[in-house]
Amino acid sequence: MAETNDQQQIPTTSTLAAWSDQLADAVQKAARSIVTVAARPRQSASGILWNTGQETIVLTADHVVEREDDITVILPDGKQIKAQLIGRDPGTDIAALRVPGIEINDKNAPAEVSDNLRVGHLVLAIGRPGADGPRVSFGAVSAIDGPRRSWHGSEIDGIIYPDVTLYPGFSGGPLVDLAGHVVGMNSSHLTRQNSSALSVATLRRVATTLHTHGHIRRAYLGIGTQQVALPAAMAQKVGVTQETALLIVTVEPGSPAEQGGLLLGDLLVSVAGQPTPDVEALRAQLGSDKLGQPLALKLLRGGEPRDVAITLGERA
């Protein structure tokens, strides 16, 4: 009886064939939203047809857009269209392109997306680097990291690390689940690992901002800081328990910091009630949602507590 059970657990040829068909169906479905982007010499890249709610645009990887004019997009139905750059964000490696006159039909369709990706899920990296149809790489999601900030200071909701191969021209194309839903956008330049992808949450947020504003709005304070130890007696004065704070070493002329009265030598302890023991903590409080709003800063100046309200500016 045990032998019979073991035999029943072995996948049959028909089961494997059905699973293979499922993978092929997922590729076929997703391929309707994958385009070729010719925006650099020699090697074309991939892009995703994306519905902003107002129009269908193309999202691709910023690093593959090496020229801002004379950009050609080849749609899934083979039609070539001259695209216009809407905006770009090097910090998340996302660029948005407008494709005038695109016809949505059974061959060209905006991506269907899913936010339900988990570590261990099987995924497909799909690219369309040329006119000969989609190309595919298959693997599992080994890790999902985030939220975090890029070295540019951009907010990234999540970075996906799939065990797939990103062949030349795959950047800008989608990472797809077994239902053919887009779960991320592939990029070979996003991290130090060759295979990584931006989450749908990041794509959705950045696409909306680029489509609305043409650029990513970034708040800035206008200071340079250095992490220093915060003695317990000084921490007690301002009612915090952290062991480090940020010493202000530069103040940009004309910046919100200068206009708000910040001085060299001030010790920044908290922003909006949140401790600032390091630069990352400070950056986390300088999101675009804080633009134009007064922000409460707690300082130590000459060893004495001081509260300052500053309205953040927008980084040009």
Image: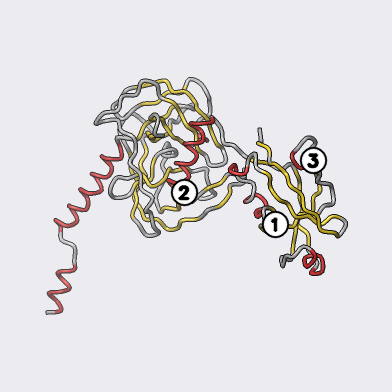
Which residue is rendered at x = 29% and y = 35% of the image?
32
Callout 1 environment at 10 Å: few (<14), some (14 to 19), or many (20+)? many
Residue, far bottom: 1
Q: Is residue 276 above or below residue 264?
A: below
Percent x, y of residue 138: 34, 50
Q: Which residue is mark 3?
A: 258
Q: Secondary structure at mark 2?
A: strand
Please identify the quadrant where the N terminus is shown. Answer: bottom left
Quarter of the image for residue 106 reads top left
Observer-side mark, 2 or 3, equals 3
**Mark 1 and mark 3: Cα distance apart in space:** 19 Å
Percent x, y of residue 294: 68, 44
Q: Is residue 119 above or below residue 183?
A: below
Q: Secondary structure at mark 1?
A: loop
Q: Which residue is mark 2?
A: 196
Which residue is rendered at x = 66% and y = 36% of the image?
315
Quarter of the image for residue 11 reads bottom left
Q: Give residue 90's mark.
A: none
Percent x, y of residue 235: 77, 65
Q: Is residue 46 left or right of residue 221?
A: left
Q: Which residue is mark 1?
A: 276
Quarter of the image for residue 112 reads top left
Which of 43 and 256 lies nearest the eye of the viewer?
Answer: 256
Q: Mark 1 or 2 closer to N-term?
A: 2
Which of 78 and 52 lies nearest the eye of the viewer?
Answer: 52
Which residue is rendered at x = 64% and y = 50% of the image?
285
Callout 3 environment at 10 Å: few (<14), some (14 to 19), or many (20+)? some
**Mark 2 and mark 3: Cα distance apart in space:** 40 Å
Observer-side mark, 1 or 2, equals 1
Q: Mark 1 or 3 closer to N-term?
A: 3
Please identify the quadrant where the C terminus is shown. Answer: top right
